[in-house]
Image (tube, rainbow, N blue to C red):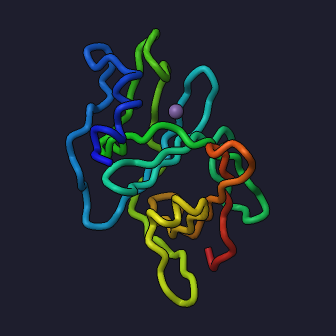
């Protein structure tokens, strides 16, 4: 799938003459894959958790935001793929536009895929397909391992949970 295809839903929902959100051109931002967590004060406050996978930001809306407590599971609803440049986006999405409200970067950084099977690293795209992602987030606020697990009938529902580690 091309980036244009992956971003078609993102593009369709937005009028770029009205919103300052990026259209997206870049296919790479840093050597390491990046992540971002954006606090999105929209109709309902939530946190958008995004991981660079396959030249776009795979995205989940986390109503309660990530927890640092391994005992806490957080619902994460898969949303549209976003362009990589979105990781730097902060500001106001105007009234009448999709996601109207304010976006603030809560944390950002790079991540490392840590999912292994039989001692071998499982490629992140396979993790996404399989519905089990394990990443080490190297953020400014958050440093530690998180797991995302898809569950239930609806393919969009995932759980986000901190893994037990020294952090
Ligand atoms: Mn959002």
**Farthest bottom residue in view:** 119
Residue 15, given in percent of the width and then of the height, sits at 32, 16
Position of 15 relative to 147 (above/below):
above
Residue occupying the far left of the picture: 25
From the top left corner, tell me how far across and down residue 103 is, in percent. Answer: 46, 31
Q: Residue at x 39, y 57 (%)?
A: 53
Count of labels shown?
0
Q: Residue at x 55, y 27 (%)?
A: 41
Where residue 98 appears, x then y in whole percent? 46, 20
Left or right, 24 with reference to 34: left
Q: Residue furthest top?
A: 96
Q: Position of residue 95 (x, y in %)?
A: 46, 10
Q: Quadrant of the C terminus?
A: bottom right
Q: Is residue 55 left or right of residue 144?
A: left
Residue placed at 62% from the left, 59% from the top? 148
- Give the camera-side residue of 113 and 64: 113
* Nearer to me, 54 or 110: 54
Say which of 167 and 52 sits in front: 52
Instruction: Indicate whether 20 appears above or below 152.
Output: above
Q: Is residue 115 left or right of residue 9?
A: right
Residue 48 is left or right of residue 155, and the answer is: left
Name above or below for residue 146 compared with residue 8.
Answer: below
Q: Residue at x 79, y 63 (%)?
A: 71
């Amino acid at each position: 799938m091309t980036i244009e295809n992956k971003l078609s839903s993102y593009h369709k929902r937005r009028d770029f003459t009205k919103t300052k959100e990026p259209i997206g051109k870049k296919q790479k931002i840093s050597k390491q894959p990046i992540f971002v967590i954006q606090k999105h004060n929209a109709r309902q406050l939530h946190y958008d958790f995004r991981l660079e996978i396959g030249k776009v930001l795979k995205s989940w809306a986390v109503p309660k935001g990530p927890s640092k407590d391994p005992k806490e599971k957080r619902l994460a609803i898969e949303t549209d793929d976003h362009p990589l440049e979105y990781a730097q986006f902060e500001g106001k999405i105007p009234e009448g536009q999709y996601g109207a409200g304010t976006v603030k970067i809560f944390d950002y950084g790079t991540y490392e895929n840590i999912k292994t099977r039989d001692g071998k690293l499982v490629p992140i795209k396979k993790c996404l397909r399989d519905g089990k992602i394990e990443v080490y987030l190297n953020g400014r606020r958050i440093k530690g391992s998180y797991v995302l697990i898809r569950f239930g009938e609806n393919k969009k529902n995932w759980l986000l949970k901190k893994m037990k580690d020294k952090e």
